[in-house]
Image (cartoon, rainbow, N blue to C red):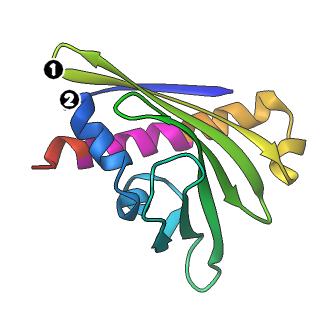
């Protein structure tokens, strides 16, 4: 899995509040364009975010599903963006003296993206997740 880490100037509770608000997903996830629906039980295992990826007019409707969650510390997702494929994403939060170390791990699990050799796939995922964590930090650090 590609691993990306960032220290956020917000408590784990504030960072978790962003992750737990499915309507904020397109604000911090690179590639997510809009939300169509968020299951009421989000982020409980089995719940889904119904989103679109891409740019208009070439938007693709798909979903992301929670595989596992430990409120305040871990969120494991199956992110879909067909026809590109699927990925497993794990976001871990670790308290760090009033701040939060956020670690995001991601790898393709199905579809054409899985056919790309790992040494080529990982740098692209890392680059995208550097920006995603930067956006997550912006939202969490400015959240009241």
Mark seen at residue 98: 1
Around disc 1, counting alpha carbons within 10 Å, would you say few (fewer than 14), some (14 to 19), or many (20 or more)?
few
Mark seen at residue 11: 2
Give 94 or 119, whichever is nearer the viewer: 94
Callout count: 2
In screen coordinates, is 32 left or right of 109? left
Residue shown at 42% from the left, 58% from the top? 25
In screen coordinates, is 76 left or right of 141? right
Around disc 2, counting alpha carbons within 10 Å, would you say few (fewer than 14), some (14 to 19), or many (20 or more)?
many
User: Pointer 1 and pointer 2: residues touching (CB < 8 Å)?
Assistant: yes
The span shown in magenta is 128-139
Point out residue 104 in the picture as x, y percentages from the top left corner: 51, 31
Residue shown at 39% from the left, 52% from the top? 28
In the current view of this chain or complex, which residue is farthest to the right? 115
Give 104 or 93, whichever is nearer the viewer: 93
Between the C-alphas of marks 1 and 2, the distance is 5 Å
To which quarter of the image does residue 54 belong? bottom right
């Amino acid at each position: 899995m590609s691993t990306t880490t960032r220290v956020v100037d917000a408590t784990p509770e504030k960072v978790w509040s962003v992750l737990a608000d499915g309507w904020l997903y397109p604000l911090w996830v690179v590639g997510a364009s809009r939300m169509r629906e968020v299951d009421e039980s989000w982020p409980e295992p089995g719940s889904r975010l119904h989103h679109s990826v891409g740019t208009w007019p070439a938007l693709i409707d798909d979903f992301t599903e929670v595989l596992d969650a430990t409120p305040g510390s871990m969120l494991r997702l199956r992110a879909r963006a067909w026809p590109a494929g699927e990925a497993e994403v794990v976001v871990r939060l670790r308290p760090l003296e009033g701040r939060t170390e956020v670690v995001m791990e991601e790898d393709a699990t199905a579809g054409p993206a899985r056919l790309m050799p790992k040494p080529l796939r990982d740098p692209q995922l890392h680059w995208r997740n550097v920006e995603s964590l930067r956006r997550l930090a912006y939202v969490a650090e400015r959240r009241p």
